[in-house]
Every structure is written in structure tokens, then in C-alpha cells.
Amino acid sequence: MRFRSYSVLPGFGPTLGFTLLYLGLMVLLPISALVLYSVTHLSAAEFWQVVSEPRVVASFKLSFFASLIAALINSLFGLILAWILVRYEFPGRRLIDALIDLPFAMPTAVSGIALCAIFANNGWIGKLLAPWGIELAYNPIGIVIALTFIGLPFVVRTLQPVLKESERELEEAAASLGANRLQTFVRVIWPGLVPALLTGFALAFARAIGEYGSVIFIAGNLPMVSEIAPLMIMSHLEEYDYAGASAIAVVMLAFSFILLLLINKLQAWSWQRIGGVRA
Amino acid sequence: MSQKITVTPIQQVTREPSWVRWLLIGLGVGWFVLLLLLPLATIFVQAFKQGLTVFFAAISEPDALKALGLTALVTLLSVPLNLIFGVSAAWAIARFRFPGRQLLITLIDLPFSVSPVVAGLMFVLLFGSRGWFGPWLSEHDIKIIFSTPGIILATTFITLPFVVRELLPQMEARGSEEEEAAMVLGASGLQMFWRVTLPSIRWSLMYGLLLSTARAVGEFGAVSVVSGHIRGQTNTLPLHIEILYNEYQTSAAFAVATLLALFGILTLLGETLLARLRGPSGD
């Protein structure tokens, strides 16, 4: 039995060898260092003490729910944006299509201070709502705003190709069989969009859970109120409590690993639906 | 007797009523302006708020220039590393079938889903003074954490998947027939790579390079953990912006931010251009 199936193409040994070496050094070694550090420096009871501390639990909850709300908002507006970008013609369409990736292209610290400048009480938007007693920055609402900003491209960019590939003939068939437009959307278009929408949601959610740069400026970072989980790692590090930081990081790592596996499954499902191929 | 048959054009039945269309366009464009366009505009407005003198002083200050230099150095080292890795990994994974292939792809994706702060912490626990190799490193007087090598390592980790992720689907979709033909006709491995593989993946390669460069230039969380914030020494541009902002030098912070924002806009222009060059089929 051969390790790989036969091919006339050269270079399998060297490229795979280099890939494994590089991944081993750059990814596996650092991850093992983290997990081993918390295992060897903390007993199970100490580990639990760190991650069940009220301030840390509050930060986990906040990160989870703020990311969830942001991903839900993104699913709605991402769907609308993907839909109008693919299906409609209107002035500025190309510009919007190009600028959707702005949150990816812009350094997170720059986005952070820019969002702060807009949504704080003296900012362009914050100013409008401040008289009503609504504050958008330096509280959990600010965190949701930043996470919504950072996650928007994920939903739009996963939905766009699916909408482009979807067969318009099916919609025509539905219409010719007497369905109205709403029925066609709910019964014909929507089922095809669900896997991609879920994938985009999960990608935006995963990114939001770990996001740091765009959030810390607008969050205000008040203990028990607006501290996100990555910030708790930072504050343990600043006190030179490496073991404590590693415990929180292990919890976050485990969570992102589960999300990654889920996203892989969702992506495979989503491509299957539209009959495409995936690497 | 002739009966009049009315035929509704197909475009009409597969389209939303026009009020729905305009409502959706309004919502989408409104959301875009609120969430993306206003923050972008505010960077430039804030930067010039205190006039051109403050703006130019902020971007020509020695600390800012040093931060710019460090950012450039880190990017110029981490991006080529991931380019070599990306091409080699994409070749092994897209052109050969072997056990554990899917696991390898998952492993490559991992840096995307790890929080940047966690990523930075990993390298502190490896090379920091209390980390696994800390004692050995300090014995040999090698500094990785709170120094440039740490920043390069963290940035390389964060940007690792970009090039592979662009190359893989395209190489899979294109198939290996042309490369096999080249080999069967007697080309050497290198000839095949330069004349057949590279021309077919060049736009995806450029796209991956563009994405990793943008991320490398702007990385904040991971770099923030490993840098130690030593002014004029281990501050990259994003960290320099953070310091200025926290010192209430808002205009100066936004002035430096415009440099990065312009770079971001250039990246988006490049993306749009490359997407057009690649064409709908992806090559």
C-alpha cells in the first residue's frame, strides 16, 4: 500500500514535509505550549478558580452574548446587502460592493478609534441620541456595534456567490405554477440560502468572540460591565499572572476549536447545496 | 370571436414589487453608510481637525517614523514566509491525495479562529522570560518577546492561512491535467511550476498576498501582547495609534490612522482590480 495514490506530478515529499514542519513550528508548538502551561502550572481546582471568578465569568458571558447579537444583526443586514448587490442595479452599487471588505482591510485599532469617534456622546451619531439618554459607547452596546462592524463582510461574502449561482429558472417555475413572490422567496429561495447564511453567521460569531482591537476603545472596559474575554487575558498578563492568563486562553481556544469544526461542516453543506466544489 | 390573452413578462413575476426593492436598497445603503462609510470619513475629518501643521507633525515625528519602519519590516518578513508556505502547502494538498489531508486543512484554518490575544499569549508562554524556552533564551542573551522577533512570529501566525486559502480552491477547480501533460511531455518539475502552475495561479496568489499584507500591517491584538509597548523600539503603527489615543492626542492618533486607512483603501482597490482580472471562473 502506498501512502498516497499514484501521480506523475513531482514534489509531494518536499512540499508536504515543509508544510508539516512549518505548521508544527508555527501552529502546533505554540498551541501545545499554551495547553501544557496551564496544565503544568495549575491544578484542576486552581484552573477552575481562575475561570469561575465572577469577573472572568462576566467577561465570558459578555463576549458570548455580544457576539451572538452582533452576528444576528449581521445575518439580517448582510442578507439584505448581499441581495441588493447581486439582484438589483442602483447607483453606487459597485462602490458599496468594493467597500464591504473595509472591516478586513482596515487595521482593527483604526476601526476602533473611528467607531469611538462616531458613536461616543460627542460623535456624529452619538450626539443625536445623547439627549434622549441613550449612550452608544463605553458600554455593552458599544461592544455590539464594534463586533457588528467587524463581522459584516463574512455574511455578505458567503451569501453573494450562493445568490449568484442560484438558478433563476426555479423561481420562474414557481411563479408560473402560481406562487406569488413572497411564497417563492420562502419556499424556493430561502432553503437554498440557509446553509450559507448559517456559515456566514458562524464565521462572524467566531471572529467576534476573539476580537480585540476594534472593541477595546469603544468598550470602556468597566469590570463586570464591559470587559470582554480577551481583555481578561490582557489584565492577567499585566499582573504577570501567566498561569491565570493561560487558563482563560485555554477556555477560549477550546471554544474556537469547536466553532471551527462546526464552520467546516457548515461550509461543506453549503457548497453541496449549490453543487460546487470545495477544497 | 377572438379572445385577448394577457401575458405577464417573466421578469415581472420573478421580481419583487418596486416598493420592496426600494425599501431593501434603502435599508442596505443606509446600513452601509452608517456602519462603514461614516467611520471611514470620520478618520480623515478628525485627522485634519487641528490643521495641517498638527497632521504633518504627527506623521513625521521620530516615534511615528520608527513605528512605520517596524511595521514595514515585520510585514516584509512575515508575508514572504507565508507565501512560500502557502504555495508549498497548496501544492501538496491540491495535487495529491493522502490520509490526514482534511485534518491538515483544518490545522491551516486554525489561526483564523484563534483570538489574536490568545495567539500572542502562546508566543509569550513559549519565549517569554517565564515561558518554556525563557531560561535558555536569557542565558544566551536572546530576546524574542518584547522585541522584534516576537512581533514577527505573532504576525506570521495570524496571517498564515491567507495565501493557502486563496490558492486551494482555485487549484482544485482547475485540476491537474495541464501540469500532468507538461510532465509527460518531459518538462522538469521547476519548468512545470514556472510555466504552467504559476501563470495559472498568479491572480489568486496576488490576492492572497494582498490580504495577508493588509492583515500584517494592521495586526493589533497579537502584536500588543508580545511587543511590550516600548516607545520608539517595539511599537508598530497600530500600537503607536493606541498610545497617542490613550494620551488624548486624538488628532495625532487619527493623523497616523489616515496612513493606515489609505493603505486599507489601496488594498480594497487592489482587491477589486484582481477580482476583475481573475474573472468569474477564478483564474
Image: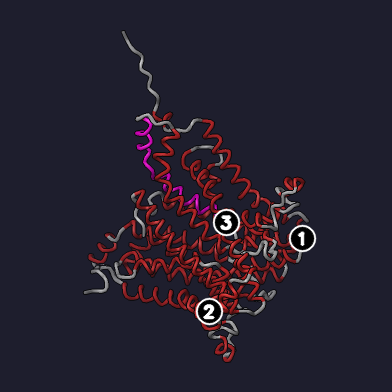
> Residue A44: which numbered mark, if any?
2
Residue A156 located within the stretch drawn in magenta: yes
Magenta segment's dominant SS is: helix
Chain of the residue displaying label 1? B
Q: CA distance from mark 2 to mark 3?
A: 35 Å
Residue B14's disc number: none
* Picture coordinates of residue A232, whole percent (x, y): 63, 70
Q: Nearer the viewer, residue A130 or B60?
A: A130
* Count of number-bearing discs: 3
Q: Where does the N terminus of chain B fall, quadrant-wise?
A: top left
Q: Residue furthest top?
A: B1
Dot placed on the residue nearer the N-terminal end, 2 or 3: 2
Query: Circle 3 sits in a helix, a strand or a loop, which is it?
Result: helix
- Residue depicted at 37% across the width and 58% down the height: B170
Q: Horizontal and vertical percent for residue B117?
A: 58, 70
Identify the secondary structure beneath mark 1.
helix
Q: Nearer the viewer, residue B54 or B149?
A: B149
Q: Write the start and end of the magenta stretch as one range.
A: A151-175
Instruction: Report which quarter residue B192 is drawn in.
Output: bottom left
Circle 1: is it few (<14), some (14-19), or many (20+) Cα within 10 Å?
A: some
- The tag on residue B54 is 1
- The residue depicted at 68 percent of the width and 76 percent of the height is B230
Q: Position of residue A116 (x, y in %)?
A: 69, 56
> Which numbered disc, 1 or 2, marks the residue closer to the eye?
2
Q: Position of residue B191 (x, y in %)?
A: 32, 68
Element class at badge 2:
helix
Residue B204 vs residue B195, the one in the foreground = B204
The reply, left or right, for residue B205 in relation to residue A245 is left
Residue lying at the far left of the rendered structure: A1
